[in-house]
């Protein structure tokens, strides 16, 4: 029941193209991680900006490149915050998807962190 509820929440991303030569990692990224990130986008961005403001009250008045540098330095390199952002994705995996994630955890974590960074930076 939980697995069906979780997958029903995920938006369809029609711009994702699947190709025959895609690796299992790329397929999982496109079919599971990207829809979860799209669903969680507002939460991820709000959380990241909130953490940035907590560390630098002038964050909102910085120019875009300064915001990116600050977020890169503080938010995305802080292991606790990185784990929390990753947890926002992992928490919406089905049990089967969690097993797939755990089989190549470091690679999936790296991809999740990279995609989270892109999503945050695209809103600045």
Image (cartoon, helix red, strand yellow):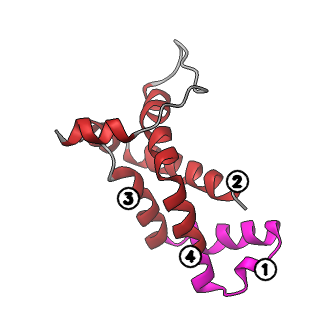
Q: Circle 4 is placed at which residue position?
A: 50
- Mark 4 nearby-residue class (10 Å; few <14, some 14–19, many ≥20): some
Which image quarter: residue 8?
top left
Report x, y in % for residue 22. Answer: 52, 20
* Image point (46%, 44%), residue name: 107
Which quarter of the image is occupied by the C terminus? bottom right
Which image quarter: residue 31?
top left
Spatial CA distance of label 3 from label 4 is 17 Å
- Mark 2 nearby-residue class (10 Å; few <14, some 14–19, many ≥20): few
Of pointers 3 and 4, the one earlier in the residue sequence:
4
* Image point (61%, 75%), residue name: 74
Residue 81 shows in the view = yes
Magenta highlight on residue 56:
yes
Q: Circle 3 is placed at which residue position?
A: 87
Q: Secondary structure at mark 3?
A: helix
Which image quarter: residue 3?
top left
Of pointers 4 and 1, the one earlier in the residue sequence:
4
Q: Is residue 102 above or below residue 60?
A: above
Magenta residues, start to end: 51-78
Of pointers 4 and 2, the one earlier in the residue sequence:
4
Tell me, for residue 122, which label it has, or none: 2
Q: For the residues labelled 4 and 2, say whether their Cβ atoms are less than 8 Å apart.
A: no
Spatial CA distance of label 2 from label 1 is 17 Å
Of pointers 2 and 3, the one earlier in the residue sequence:
3
Report x, y in % for residue 88. Answer: 40, 57
Q: Is residue 38 above or below residue 21?
A: below
Nearest the camera: 83 or 34?
34
Q: Circle 1 is placed at which residue position?
A: 61
Q: Secondary structure at mark 1?
A: helix
Main secondary structure of the magenta stretch? helix
Q: For the residues labelled 4 and 1, say whether their Cβ atoms are less than 8 Å apart.
A: no
């Amino acid at each position: 029941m939980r697995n069906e509820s979780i997958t029903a929440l995920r938006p369809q991303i029609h711009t994702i193209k699947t190709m025959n030569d895609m690796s299992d990692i790329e397929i999982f990224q496109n079919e599971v991680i990207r829809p979860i990130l799209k669903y969680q986008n507002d939460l991820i961005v709000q959380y990241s900006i909130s953490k940035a403001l907590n560390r630098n009250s002038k964050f909102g008045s910085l120019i875009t490149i300064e915001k990116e540098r600050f977020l890169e330095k503080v938010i995305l390199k802080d292991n606790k915050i990185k784990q929390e952002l990753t947890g926002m994705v992992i928490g919406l995996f089905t049990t089967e998807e969690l097993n797939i994630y755990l089989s190549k955890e470091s690679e999936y974590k790296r991809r999740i962190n990279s995609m989270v960074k892109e999503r945050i930076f695209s809103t600045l």
